[in-house]
Amino acid sequence: MLNEICDMLDGYTGRDKIIRTLCYTTKLASGLYAQKDPEWAKKLAIFSCKMSQTRATLRLFDDLPMLAYSLSYGTGSKEPDRWMGLIGFVTNLIDHAYYPVDKICWLLEHNLLNVQNPTKWDTINSVLWVASIYLNLMKTIRSFAVMEQHKSCIDKAENKASQAFQMLLVKQRMEALSILRLTLDLIHAGSTLPKGMLWGGCFQTWHVGLIGSISSLMGLYQYVTKKRIVRESA
């Protein structure tokens, strides 16, 4: 267990998932304690805010890794389905638009940049975030459907007992979890939009904390499970 935690903290992806979990669990606790213990709730809110700021700062360096991934992904020709490839390609374009906007929002938040309408950039940031999550959700649903088609092609008992088929079942269960997690992320992202756009501004602090906490814990579980699968198959 200790080795797995250290392994997560040693890499950017694992560390981000832990920071994200801390951010939303403390946000949830802050919302729940808002009436019972305002002073404690304020401290939790500050901690949650600092964790969120940490993630935002680390995202400043995501451009080059994202560019390298997009170049290797290309138009998605390696995907098992052309629709998945198309959705993945469009998602990458949106993500490349998101990162510069996210940097502008970071500069505005820290008073390093002055513009006439800073709220506009926050709105653009949220719209791009919602679009990216929505497309990722659609791609994951399509991936789940493609796996289901592959399963239906296997009708022999010996094939169903094979290691390849069992691995397909594991991957499909992981995709099902991803669908649920991305749905929660979409609900959360939509709540950051201005009032009047989707369900923007309709959630209380503990609502956002609960949604983010469940999503983060699911992400942690998937990360650890995928690591174990890789080790066992090696």
Image (tube, rainbow, N blue to C red):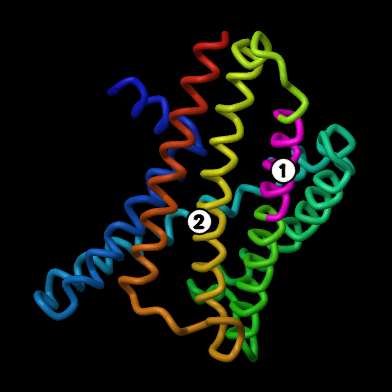
| Left or right of residue 165: residue 221 | left
Query: x, y percentage for residue 153?
Result: 77, 26
Amino acid type, callout 1: Ala
Region in magenta: 138-151
Relative to residue 77, is residue 40 depicted above or below? below
Among the two numbered marks 2 and 1 on one chain, the one whose residue lies closer to the N terminus:
2
Amino acid type, callout 2: Thr
| Left or right of residue 31: residue 84 | right
- Label ID, residue 57: 2
Quadrant that contains the C terminus: top right
Quadrant of residue 95 in the image?
Answer: bottom right
Residue drawn at point x = 58 percent, y = 71 percent: 105
Query: x, y percentage for residue 154?
Result: 73, 21
Q: Residues within 10 Å of mark 2 (few under 14, many from 20)?
A: some
Residue drawn at point x = 65 percent, y = 54 percent: 137
Query: x, y percentage for residue 194?
Result: 56, 86
Quadrant of residue 107 in the image?
Answer: bottom right
Q: Which residue is mark 1?
A: 145
Relative to residue 85, is residue 93 depicted above or below? below
Q: Is label 1 in a helix, a strand or a loop?
A: helix
Q: Is 142 covered by the magenta stretch?
A: yes
